[in-house]
Image (cartoon, helix red, strand yellow):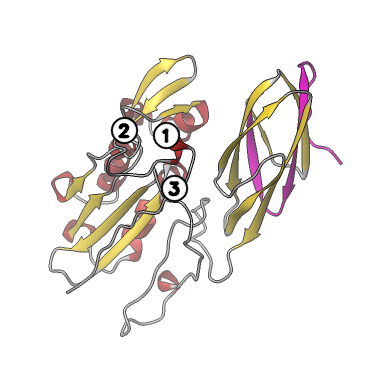
Amino acid sequence: GVGPTTDGGDGTIAVTIVGDGSVSVDPPGQTCSEPACAYDVPAGVVSLTAAPAAGNRFAGWSGDCSGDELATEVVLELSASCTATFEPLPEGALPAGIVASREIVRVPAADAPATDSETTLKIDTAVALTDVQWHVFAADDGSEVGAAHAGWRGLAAGVLEATVAAMRTPPARLRAWLGPAAGPQAYEVGAEVYAAFVDHDPDAATAFVATRPQHWRVDLYALARRRLAAAGIAPAQVHGGGLCTISDPQRFYSHRRDQRGGRMATLIWMA
């Protein structure tokens, strides 16, 4: 059957979901979590954002939408139909509190005991990571390193806290570096992003600057620093966070700026 529907508008956008996840549709600013939804909306650009459920990843769009980025757009004239496909992660499982996918990969040292927090997730990482922040961690004595990939969904879901908890080094002895990402001067978000943080942490509102009704520029770096401080890493031990992928085309790819992907690498290792 068809899930939520709306009345009124110049055309109809139909959304089909295969697998376990949801799709936000704007306009009309609603989220489809049923196998099929239909919305009557004005003609023009419709934005769709896929959100995998826990333990799943987004496989891609089909129909009138295409690509494997979570966010896509379709120009609606009379009607359009988009299918979002989700699939289970192939091996391992994310912690119960994490609702984002592709976020945590824990590879234990060769001599480490096998524990639940040291599950190796064999995930295809050949995805466009431009504009999304990488965070790297190191023990102050160089005995352990870690890395976490988290955009706004990952930050809100607690990816950084989960990464710190998975490391054997106490948080007070960790140092962190925040890699290039969509910067606060260029990254505009809507009410869904604002609510994801401020509903649970009212002081997180300081990381948002209003631009127009129900839209804000967001400082992902400030949000990450708040999360790391809450996880026990001293602010003085958190570095980086000054490079914007959107506003620096000479050095960085940016899907949001160019509407095309690229590949950038963040590396950390023990010598």
Name which residue type carries label 2.
Ser
Q: Earlier in the sequence, mark 3 or mark 2?
A: 3
| Residue 65: percent from left, percent from top | 67, 41
SS class, disc 3: helix
Which image quadrant: the C terminus?
bottom left
The part of the image, by quadrant, that contains residue 152 is: top left
Number of dots carrying numbers? 3
Q: Which residue is mark 1?
A: 257
Q: Are marks 2 and 1 in contact (CB under 8 Å)?
A: yes
Looking at the rendered image, the disc whose residue lies closer to the viewer, 3 or 2, is 2
| Residue 71: percent from left, percent from top | 56, 39
**Residue 27 seen in render:** no
| Residue 207: percent from left, percent from top | 32, 29
- The residue most toward the front is 250
- The residue most toward the right is 1
Question: Relative to 16, does residue 192 appear above or below in the rendering?
Answer: above
The part of the image, by quadrant, that contains residue 201 is: top left
SS class, disc 2: loop
Q: Which residue is mark 3?
A: 154
Q: Earlier in the sequence, mark 2 or mark 1?
A: 2
Instruction: Find out whether residue 13 is within the magenta segment.
Output: yes
Q: Nearer the viewer, residue 98 or 133?
A: 133
Q: Earlier in the sequence, mark 1 or mark 3?
A: 3
Which image quadrant: the N terminus?
top right
Q: Which stretch is magenta?
A: 1-26
- Gap in Å between the C-alphas at discs 1 and 3? 21 Å
Numbered mark located on residue 247 in the image: 2
